[in-house]
Amino acid sequence: MPRAHSGNVVVHILGGEAPPSPPPPPPGSPPSSVASDTASATSNTASTTSDAASAAGDTGSITSSTSESSLCLLPGPPSQTPPAVPECRFCFEPALAGDPLIAPCLCSGSSKFVHDRCLRKWRLMNYGRAPFVRCMECRAAYRIRYRWPRETYRFTPAQVSQVAGNARTLFLSFTCLFAALFLRTLDKAAGYQLARGILDPYPDKTFIHLVVSDTVYAVLFYFSAIAWVMTTLLYILLPTVILPNIRHHDRYVKTAILPAIGSYVLSLHFFWLYYFCKALDPQSPEAYINLELALATVNLWTPRYLMQLHNKCVDGLNRSNYGAVLDRVVGDRIVVV
Ligand SMILES: [Zn+2]
Ligand SMILES: [Zn+2]
């Protein structure tokens, strides 16, 4: 897409390495990058000239002049040419107050400069993809100064599947079922202390009768108790795995603590649902056991949720820590890293 240029552009380049010729832009490049193709291609020869001068240690200035659809570099004293008016390759505007133009990559010509703010928007639009960290035209990686070290401890989809995949959760469910049968045997030998004393010091007779009976409700009650214990262990274990790998605990805890506490309070339904149902209708403990069974089964999927929640928190922290892309032109030298 040709791009109209008005006036001449004077670029002062003193020293530095030769920027490579940019390859054709890939799909998804900003429109202005595409627009600069013609100018870049036309200016290849001139760029080589300026590179040779730079390599030779030439400290003089090189004047580049742009016309309607091409860019060429013409030697000449700066005083004989208009002052440089570099434009942003995204919005075609010059440098603005509080929003300077930077040269973030190895592109030259009309693609050289971009507003700091425009580049930030483009990077955030492409967060998690290659354009967040590199120019897709010249492929040069941006030099980014992050505000603080980025979090890198993140669960991959393979890890989530390995820990909390369908097969693993099904295996966990059967483990809970066998543990429930074992727990019921223990509680029966202990005079149903779990049901009587731990859950409710003053249980309704209907509820106790349901627990001591040999119906399926008794097993389901202990299944829910085991699922709750497993969830509690998970809430203790997961932070011990994650927190040592987090770089900024304060920020992470601020981000993750509310969803984690909310999830844990929800997982305490083994207790609060009992009293809720008892308050509603103490003569129908079946309602509590049915609801508790449903929630306990959902609880078994908690690991997957917590791992995804951790990833979401880390992504949120890193997204807010997008950093500042540094200008490759430091002073009057092109810095190539
Ligand atoms: Zn701009
Ligand atoms: Zn570039």
Image (cartoon, rainbow, N blue to C red):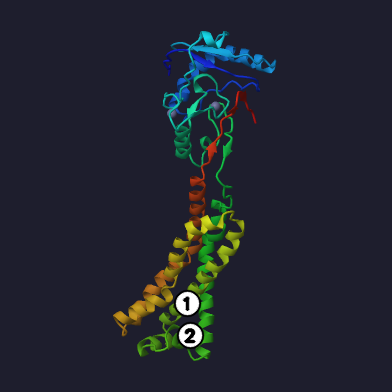
Residue 94 higher or lower than 306, as above or below:
above
Residue type highlighted by circle 2: Leu
- Asked if the beta carbon under badge 2 is closer than 8 A to the nearest atom of ligand 1, the reply is no
Residue 221 higher or lower than 75, as above or below:
below
Q: Residue furthest front?
A: 79
| Residue that appears at 47% across and 79% down | 222
Q: Do the residues labelled 2 and 1 touch (CB within 8 Å)?
A: yes
| Residue that appears at 54% across and 77% down | 179
How many numbered marks does the figure carry? 2
Residue under numbered circle 2: 194
Residue type highlighted by circle 1: Ala
Residue 212 coordinates in the image, percent (x, y) = 43, 88
For the residues marked 2 and 1, what is the alpha-carbon distance in whole angstroms?
9 Å
Residue 138, located in which quarter of the rendered image?
top right
Q: Depth check: 62 or 71 in front?
A: 62
| Residue that appears at 46% across and 39% down | 124
Residue under numbered circle 1: 225
> Can residue 289 be seen here?
no
Is 188 displayed left or right of 203 in the figure? right
Q: Crowding at label 1, few (<14), some or many (≥20) Cα neighbours within 10 Å?
A: many
Name the secondary structure under disc 2: helix
Q: Depth check: 14 or 69 in front?
A: 14
Could you say which disc has been placed on residue 23 in the image? none
Residue 37 coordinates in the image, percent (x, y) = 49, 19
Q: Depth check: 109 or 128 in front?
A: 109
Q: Residue furthest left?
A: 280
Residue 127 higher or lower than 247, as above or below:
above
